[in-house]
Image: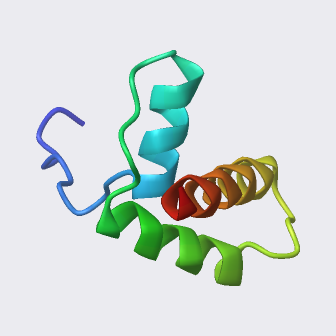
Amino acid sequence: MSDLPISESIRLRPVYRRYLKRKHHMPLRIPSDEERSDAIKVLRECYPPVWEIDEILLAEAELVTIEAMV
């Protein structure tokens, strides 16, 4: 197992990264273009929610869109 290469192709979605910052009370800035774009994708891809992660992503995507309007 230690001979297996480490994957670098898997990364956190920008919306999920923002969710983790919010959850750990880290300071948040105005949503970036990348976060806003990902929020739109989440709203399209994860509705209706099937898994718990879908619900988390949808809630954070809604917050991103609200915060982007301010």
At 21% from the left edge and 53% from the top edge, which residue is drawn?
A: 7
At 53% from the left edge and 55% from the top edge, which residue is drawn?
A: 70
Vertical comparison of 38 with 59: above or below: below
| Quadrant of the frame with the N terminus | top left
Residue 44 lies, in percent from the top left, at: 68, 84
Residue nearer the viewer, 26 or 4: 26
Q: Is residue 27 left or right of residue 48?
A: left
At 64% from the left edge and 50% from the top edge, which residue is drawn?
A: 60
Corner quadrant of residue 41: bottom right
Residue nearer the viewer, 69 or 9: 69
Corner quadrant of residue 47: bottom right
- Count of numbered badges drawn on the protein: 0
Q: Residue furthest bottom?
A: 44
In this figure, which colouring scheme has been used for the structure? rainbow
Q: In this view, does 58 lie to the left or right of 49?
A: left
Corner quadrant of residue 27: top left
Vertical comparison of 24 with 9: above or below: above
